[in-house]
Image (spheres, rainbow, N blue to C red):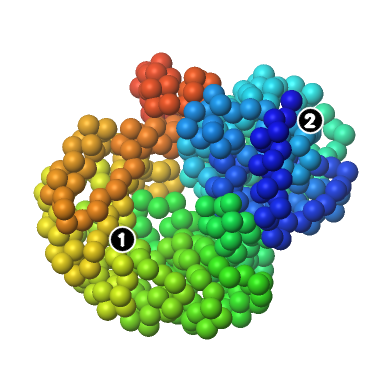
Amino acid sequence: MISQRFRDLVRLRLSDEVGRIDKDAPTKVALVYPSPYAAGMSSLGFQRIYRLVQELEGFSGERAFLDDDAEQDLRKQERAMTYESFRGIDSFSIIATSVAYEGEIAGLVRILDASGIPARREERNESHPFILAGGPLTFSNPLPLSPIVDAIIIGEAEEITPIVLRILESDHSKEKKLEELMLVPHVFVPALMGSALPDVAKVDDALLPAWAPIRTKHAVLSDMFLVETERGCSRGCTYCVMRRSTNGGMRIVDKEHLLSIIPEDAKRVGLVGAAVSDHPKIVEIVNHFADRGVEVGLSSLRPDRMTDAFVSALKRTGYRTLTTAMDGPSERMRELLNRKARIRHLIKCAELAREHKMDRLKLYLMIGLPNETDADIDECIAFSAELSKIVPLSLGIAPFCSKRNTPLDGMPFAGIDIVTDRLARLKKGLRGRVDVRSTSAKWAWVEYVLAQGGPKEGEAAIVAAREGGKFADYKRAFAALGDVGTEARPKRRLAIASI
């Protein structure tokens, strides 16, 4: 049964969407996002695949999301229905899901379970939908997904997705389809390939930029047209999956091509990428929108790129807070991260925020880094206090979690108690002078275990999701594994010919 509340909610959201691509086709794909609608419709990657499926001859896509109430308690998830037709996702032959980060694995598990689809891959048969995964998580470590999904596209999926969907629409048996998929470069088939991950796919630059067709006020990025300014990054930050060694570094979108994509009626534009402020024409691009009276949001601002002209352009497009990255709590830690942010850059950012009458400066940083000590935290306290004398200051703090396919891969988690104590030290030292917000040390540990884990940790995530997805559920599930997060390191398969 579909509740009237859900029907009314979906109809309201659909009525407020601009740019939706309505289509009917013989082969229908359930496009499942394992977080709520507001997050899914702010995901450029998810919207890119939606547009790709809608443009592919013979295929159409219908969207489904984690229920809003289930974000806090996964047990509240009901049978997942698509927004386009109110059909249960269990009635589709193909389910495609985009997973952005480790925490969304549990959302996918609960969506499948609530829809009568066994979450464990080994428990499904020919009568169940084929589950295909992709998304940002595949750039680092998708192995915790391997007990759940049938196949994973590793990396940039635009060119590979049509090939995979053509295989899946055939009348071949599931076993035959898996064998065919295994021969497609950059496709990982857990049942046949163990833990040998393919290389990360890189699409032809002619397919850039990605842009999101649908705008809606119900998204986290409300009524914002999302488009890439570049893909990848030219920098070598040691903690980042999207560093210059991934897919050849930064690939820049031509300014004129970028501007030609923006709809005339767009009042808010989101410029998306790992290094948006590194685009050589970024100030011209932002000023172009300012001249049109368009608000602009940028997904990444680097402190060493902040100039008077740039901050002036940002202010003209509606910026009231200048947000950039401190990265680490001290110069020593920033050296470890190979970040270009220096004290002089951060001071300059504070001065520019003040000169352009911004409300405040907001800096992101990590704590719990390898070899970090209380002295590093104390340096952060002293420096932040000095910055706060220039302009009101906020700090957004995340505990460090090492990711695979980075130079800091394999570095241990500092510990929940240590991170909590250092955060308390920071807050106490800056009380009344700086606004300090942080993500949970407990959930950072869960992220770390999954980020460094493999199929066993994926199995534990299934158990935790079924218990409700609370921290205590993960703690019990991981404890049952014994020494968590230390599963044998997978080797990426370098050549398809080696099969």
Residue marked by disc 2 = 91
Amino acid type of the residue that numbered disc 1 sits on in the rendered structure: Lys
Q: Nearer the viewer, residue 250 or 70?
A: 70
Left/right placement of residue 475 relative to residue 463 reads left
Amino acid type of the residue that numbered disc 2 sits on in the rendered structure: Ser
Vertical relation: 108 (above or below) 50: above
Left/right placement of residue 390 relative to residue 47 reads left
Quarter of the image holding residue 87? top right
Mark toward the start of the polypeptide (1 vs 2): 2
Secondary structure category for the residue under label 1: strand
User: Nearer the observer, disc 1 or disc 2?
Assistant: 1
Q: CA distance from mark 1 to mark 2?
A: 46 Å
Residue at horizontal 43%, vertical 43%?
404
Toward the top, the furthest residue is: 480
Would you say residue 201 is visible in this rendering?
no
Residue at horizontal 66%, vertical 35%?
5
Left/right placement of residue 92 relative to residue 357 reads right
Query: Can you give x and y, in whole percent of width and height, for residue 473 in the image?
Result: 42, 21
Residue at horizontal 49%, vertical 77%?
286
Secondary structure category for the residue under label 2: helix
Q: How many marks?
A: 2
Residue marked by disc 1 = 362
Left/right placement of residue 19 relative to residue 308 reads right
Q: Nearer the viewer, residue 411 or 290?
A: 290
Q: Residues within 10 Å of mark 2 (few under 14, many from 20)?
A: some
Asked whether the beta carbons under mark 1 and mark 2 sit within 8 Å of each other, the answer is no
Residue 189: mark? none
The quadrant of the image that shows the C terminus is top right
